Image (cartoon, rainbow, N blue to C red):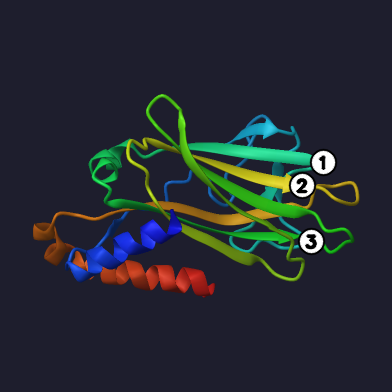
Amino acid sequence: MLLRATALLTFAAAAGVLPVQAANLIVNPGNEEAMVAGEIPGWVEVIGTGWTQRSLDPVAFEGAHYFFAGAGSTATLRQFIDVSSFATSIDGGLATVAFSGRVRSWPQTPVDTSSITISFLDAVGTVLGSHTIGPYSDTTQWQLVSADMAAPTSMRAVQLDLIATRFGGTNNDGYFDDLSLEVMAVPEPSSAALLAAGVTALLWRRRIRRQGI
């Protein structure tokens, strides 16, 4: 799926048709919104009931808070993302899904881990495919993780799962921050010229993001 996404973008560039990227589609991507009745806005606890905000030891990569699973041995936090507005490009095989985020772990032995699973769903919730990033266990810095994936035909939603796994200690110290998921749709050739300036700015923004500037 990653190779197909790369081939799609290469073909689009060769044809002079540049991709248009949406804004970040994740709600509350850095866990900055105030908790509501003990729950993280925009997210659903699938495994574990201790998901919360954390701000120190370590400090957040971006903003004041990040995602912390609490004390459960295994924990999964989920968000469903509606991408039906991209249906025409998706069904025409002209869309890719771009994900990026930061993960980190607490320095201990053995080290707890962070993983992210991105699943593609059709209109009735059938899983069309999925991609897992990780597990990661960097204890010295917020590690940048990313993936560019071809959107399967009939995709209408993306299921994003944050998975923290405890291997030692009391807390589950697989952390997540600064998440982003965007759909890039290739426009009709007649629209490409009008979009060139915007795409140039977009690519520069993604370069800065991936370099952590």
Residue 81: percent from left, percent from top: 44, 38
Seen at 23% across and 45% down, the residue is 92
The answer to whether residue 135 is left or right of residue 187 is right
First in sequence: mark 1 vs mark 2: 1
The answer to whether residue 39 is left or right of residue 153 is right
First in sequence: mark 3 vs mark 2: 3
Q: Are marks 1 and 2 in contact (CB under 8 Å)?
A: yes
Helix, strand or loop status at disc 2: strand
Residue 44 appears in the picture as rendered: yes
| Residue 209 sits above or below residue 187 on the image | below
First in sequence: mark 3 vs mark 1: 3
Seen at 49% across and 59% down, the residue is 147
Residue 46: percent from left, percent from top: 66, 31
Helix, strand or loop status at disc 3: loop
Mark 3 vs mark 2, foreground winner is: 2
Q: Are marks 3 and 2 in contact (CB under 8 Å)?
A: no
Residue 168: percent from left, percent from top: 89, 52
Disc 1 residue type?
Answer: Ser
Seen at 43% across and 73% down, the residue is 207
Q: Mark 1 and mark 2: span between their CA atoms?
A: 6 Å
Q: Mark 3 and mark 2: span between their CA atoms?
A: 18 Å
Q: Quadrant of residue 36?
A: top right
Seen at 71% across and 33% down, the residue is 47
Q: Are marks 3 and 1 in contact (CB under 8 Å)?
A: no
Q: Which mark is residue 165?
A: 2
The answer to whether residue 161 is left or right of residue 204 is right
**Front one among 153 and 42:** 153
**Front one among 136 and 195:** 136
Disc 2 residue type?
Answer: Thr
What residue is shown with label 3?
Answer: 57
Q: Which mark is residue 73?
A: 1
